[in-house]
Image (spheres, rainbow, N blue to C red):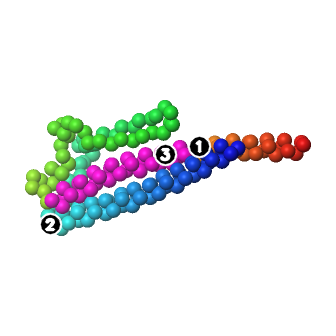
Amino acid sequence: MENICESLDKLTLKNLELMEEKIRTNIEMETILREGHIELAKARYIRGKESIGCLQIPSEDEEITSLFHLETIKSNETDVPVFDISLKKSEKDIPNPIRRFGVLVPQNLKNAQKRFQESLYITAKIANVSAQLLNIQNEFQSLMRVKKKISTNDDGNNKKL
C-alpha cells in the first residue's frame, strides 16, 4: 500500500509539472501567433490590403503541398505517441508559399511566415505534453483502482477479525 501511495504522489507531481509546461507552451504559442498576426498586418499596411488577402489563397482545384513532415512515433513501452515535425528536405519540389505574394515581398511577411512556422513546432510540443498528461492520468486512475481494491480487502480482513 505504501508503494502505491508513493507512486501516486510521484504521478501527481509529474502531472503538475506537465500541466505547468503545457500552460507555458500555450502562452508561448499565443505570443508567437500574436506576433505573426501583427507582422502580417504590417505587411498588409505596407503593400496595401488588396495585395495581401484571400486572392493569394489557393483555390480548390490547385494542389496544396505542405512544407512540413509530421511523424508520429508510438513507443511500445509507454504506449504514448510522440509527435515530431520537421521541414521537408526537398524544397525544390515544394514551392515556397510566400512566392504567391511576388518576388520582392516585405520583410514583415517573411517574419510572419517564420512566426507561423515556429507555431507548428510548438504545436507538436503541446501535443507531446498532452499525450504524456493523458498517459499519467490513465496510470493514476489504474493505481487508484488498485489502491481501492487493496483498501477494501484490508477492511474486509479487519472486519472478519
Helix, strand or loop for disc 2 = helix
Residue drawn at 18 percent across, 51 percent down:
98
Q: Earlier in the sequence, mark 2 or mark 3?
A: 2
92 to the left or right of 156: left
Q: Label 3: which residue? A: 132
Q: Label 2: which residue? A: 46
User: Which amino acid does the dot numbered 1 rest on?
Assistant: Glu
User: Which amino acid does the dot numbered 3 rest on?
Assistant: Gln
Say above or below: 73 vs 151. above
Q: Position of residue 74 (x, y in %)?
A: 45, 35
Q: Earlier in the sequence, mark 3 or mark 1?
A: 3
* Residue 81 placement: quadrant: top left
Q: Is residue 55 visible?
A: no
Q: Label 1: which residue? A: 139
Total numbered circles: 3
Q: Is residue 38 visible?
A: yes
* Residue 115 placement: quadrant: bottom left
Magenta-highlighted residues: 107-136
Q: Is mark 2 in CB contact (under 8 Å) with mark 1?
A: no
159 to the left or right of 70: right
Image quarter hosting the N terminus: top right
Residue drawn at 48 percent across, 39 percent down:
80
Disc 3/disc 1 C-alpha distance (Å): 11 Å
Q: Position of residue 6 (x, y in %)?
A: 63, 47
Of tags 2 and 3, the one toward the viewer is 3
Q: Is residue 125 magenta?
A: yes
Mark 2 Cα within 10 Å, few/some/many (few <14, many 20+)?
Answer: some
User: Which amino acid does the dot numbered 2 rest on?
Assistant: Ile
The rendered magenta stretch, by its main secondary structure, is classed as: helix
Helix, strand or loop for disc 1 = helix
Q: Position of residue 105 (x, y in %)?
A: 13, 57
Mark 3 Cα within 10 Å, few/some/many (few <14, many 20+)?
Answer: many
